[in-house]
């Protein structure tokens, strides 16, 4: 029993220091991010790549916003219609009449032993006319008519990958807030780590890279058997501190249609989280340490209050929450999610449940379909 206060102090102290390390070493970089004056001001030819499967409603709602971009340089929008059984083909044919930069690819058969959207995406990339590729999804719409211009501006000498932010549309309800916070929290990590010289993933809703890089990596060959990973695993294997940049600009965001049912969102998260086991070992370790610090912080806090004077614990917790709150506030402003900030302590508690629940998805077999 005499050792319990020391154990409580040690556990709480380590967990607290780990949390502060991530916020002060990495997350502050996004909080204080400023647009670089060196961003490329030239407009280079760009190929926008979109894969669609039975998404006629999304095509009708979102593709016109991509086709109507204000971009003076040469660009094309490549839409790969992956065996759709709905009205996707007819909607695309109708759009082609008004937008000649639209390039439609019709896939009539499934790729054997290549689940997910890697095959249609590969077809779209190989068919692209230009070196700079800008990827998004059929359920995404750019936040402004300057999306292409802003994202391509991240390319400069030596930069092969540009990471952007793909948020979700704001609607009423708790599920929408949870989806948007989860998206914000994921972006907080991958954008901050990229700014800190450790890029480890990107999201296909808003991601750009060079066609040459795709061929150098032999496309998705390293993980072609997995249904997911066309964005995060591809970036994880080829991104480094020298070839990766980020663009954080409200005009460069995309907005997706969020899931309307809890079951849909949970299924999406399990599918996405299942690719995490294939990250580089150093990235898996770092993310696991951050995850465990979230899970253990409040249990360690309760343990500390049981055996240590509150005059020791309360100042430490206050400092942690002040730093966390300040960084959350600035980052939420930058990613246009400011309305989530008043609940930031509740989000901190929520992450315990979130990480605990989805931990099992790391070893679950992912679903084979991508849509």
Image: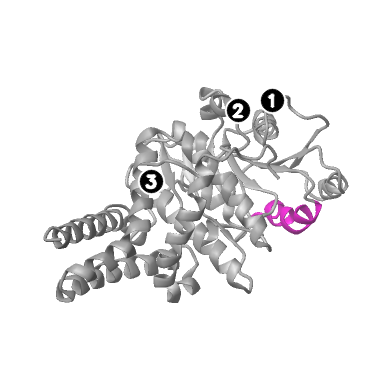
Magenta-drawn segment: 56-69
Residue 265 location, quadrant: bottom right
* Relative to 63, 338 lies left or right: left
Disc number for residue 224: 2
Nearer to us in this view, 42 or 293: 293
User: Which residue bears the numbered disc 3?
Assistant: 287
Q: Is residue 307 visible?
A: yes
Q: Tag count in the figure?
A: 3
**Above-or-below relation of 278 to 304:** above
Kindly state the secondary structure of the residue where label 2 is placed: loop
- Count residues near mark 2 (Cα–Cα under 10 Å), then give few for <14, some for 14-19, many for 20+: some
Cα distance between the residues tagged 1 and 2: 8 Å
Residue at x 45%, y 65% (from the top left corner): 350
x, y (%) of residue 357?
A: 50, 54
Q: Earlier in the sequence, mark 1 or mark 2?
A: 1
| Cα separation between marks 1 and 3 | 30 Å
Crowd around label 1: few <14 · some 14–19 · many ≥20 (10 Å) = few
Residue 113, numbered label: 1
Q: Are marks 1 and 2 in contact (CB under 8 Å)?
A: yes
To which quarter of the image does residue 310 belong? Answer: bottom left
- Residue 38 magenta-highlighted: no
Q: Is residue 11 above or below residue 133?
A: below
Instruction: Identify the mark nearer the N-term, 3 or 2.
Output: 2
Q: Residue at x 14, y 59 (%)?
A: 6
């Amino acid at each position: 029993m005499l050792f319990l206060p020391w154990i409580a102090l040690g556990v709480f102290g380590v967990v607290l220091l780990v949390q502060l390390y991530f916020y002060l070493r990495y997350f502050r970089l996004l909080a204080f991010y400023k647009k670089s004056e060196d961003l490329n001001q030239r407009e280079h030819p760009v190929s926008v790549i979109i894969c669609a499967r039975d998404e006629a409603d999304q095509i009708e709602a979102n593709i016109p916003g991509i086709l109507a971009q204000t971009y003076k340089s040469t660009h094309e929008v490549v839409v790969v219609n992956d065996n759709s059984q709905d009205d996707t083909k007819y909607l695309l044919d109708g759009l082609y009449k008004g937008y000649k930069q639209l390039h439609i690819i019709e896939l009539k058969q499934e790729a054997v032993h290549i689940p997910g959207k890697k095959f249609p995406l590969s077809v779209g990339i190989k068919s692209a006319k230009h070196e700079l590729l800008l990827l998004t999804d059929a359920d995404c719409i750019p936040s402004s008519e300057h999306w292409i211009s802003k994202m391509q501006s991240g390319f400069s000498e030596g930069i092969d990958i540009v990471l952007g932010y793909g948020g979700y549309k704001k609607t009423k309800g708790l599920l929408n807030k949870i989806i948007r916070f989860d998206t914000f929290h994921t972006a907080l990590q991958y954008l901050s780590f990229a700014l800190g010289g450790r890029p480890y993933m990107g999201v296909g809703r808003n991601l750009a890279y060079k066609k040459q890089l795709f061929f150098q990596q032999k496309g998705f060959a390293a993980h072609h058997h997995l249904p997911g990973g066309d964005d995060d695993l591809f970036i994880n294997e080829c991104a480094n501190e020298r070839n990766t940049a980020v663009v954080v600009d409200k005009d460069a965001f995309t907005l997706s249609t969020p899931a309307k049912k809890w079951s849909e969102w949970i299924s999406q998260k399990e599918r996405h989280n299942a690719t995490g086991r294939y990250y580089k070992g150093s990235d898996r370790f770092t993310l696991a340490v951050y995850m465990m610090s979230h899970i253990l912080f409040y249990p360690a806090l309760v343990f500390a209050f049981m055996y240590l004077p509150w005059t020791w614990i309360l100042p430490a917790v206050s400092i942690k929450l002040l730093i966390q709150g300040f960084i959350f506030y600035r980052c939420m402003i930058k990613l246009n999610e400011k309305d989530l900030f008043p609940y930031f302590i509740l989000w901190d508690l929520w992450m315990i449940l979130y990480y605990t629940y989805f931990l099992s998805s790391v070893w679950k077999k992912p679903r084979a379909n991508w849509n």
